[in-house]
Amino acid sequence: MIIEATMKLADARAECRVSQYKLARKARVGKQTIVNAEHGIIISRISAHAILRTLNELRVNDGLEPIGFYEIDWKIQGE
């Protein structure tokens, strides 16, 4: 049996000790997009990929494993 674990974006962000504002700025999305994603509000796939790419860069710099797209518990437009 395979169990897929998902992580909340807020927890993944907290592991990197980065604010919503800083993650948004580095990912080149609005801070409200980060807030929406963390509160379960639908965001675009493009924004999700930008956030994840940036988050994974931060994670690798902190010695943490990168996270896969479907390992984050978020709602993506069109899914």
Image (cartoon, rainbow, N blue to C red):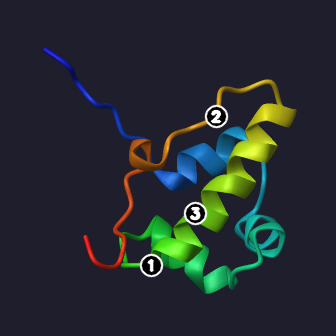
| Residue 22 location (% of width, % of height) | 82, 67
Crowd around label 2: few <14 · some 14–19 · many ≥20 (10 Å): some
Residue in the picture at 66% in, 46% down: 14
Q: Which amino acid does label 2 sit on?
A: Pro
Question: Whole-Å distance between the Cαs marked 3 and 1?
Answer: 10 Å
Q: Residue 77: which quarter of the image? A: bottom left
Quarter of the picture holding the C terminus: bottom left
Look at label 3 and name its amino acid: His
**Vertically, is 67 above or below 21?**
above
- Seen as rendered, the residue at the extreme top is 1
Q: Which of 1 and 41 is in front in this view?
A: 1
- Does dot 3 land on a helix, a strand or a loop? helix
Q: Which of the 4 quarters of the picture holds residue 75?
A: bottom left
Give the residue number, with chain letter if any, for mark 2.
66
Type of residue at label 1?
Ile
Estimate the x, y position of residue 42 in percent, counting from the top left. 37, 78
**Nearest to N terminus: mark 3 or mark 1:** 1
Examine the image and state in which quarter residue 20 appears: bottom right
Could you tell which of marks 1 and 2 lies nearer the N-terminus? 1
Q: Which residue is drawn at 70% across and 80% down?
A: 29
Q: Which residue in the structure is indicated by mark 1?
A: 43
Residue at point 55%, 75% (across, down): 46
Q: How crowded is mark 3: few (under 14 residues within 10 Å), some or many (20 or more)?
A: few
Q: Mark 3 points at which residue?
A: 49
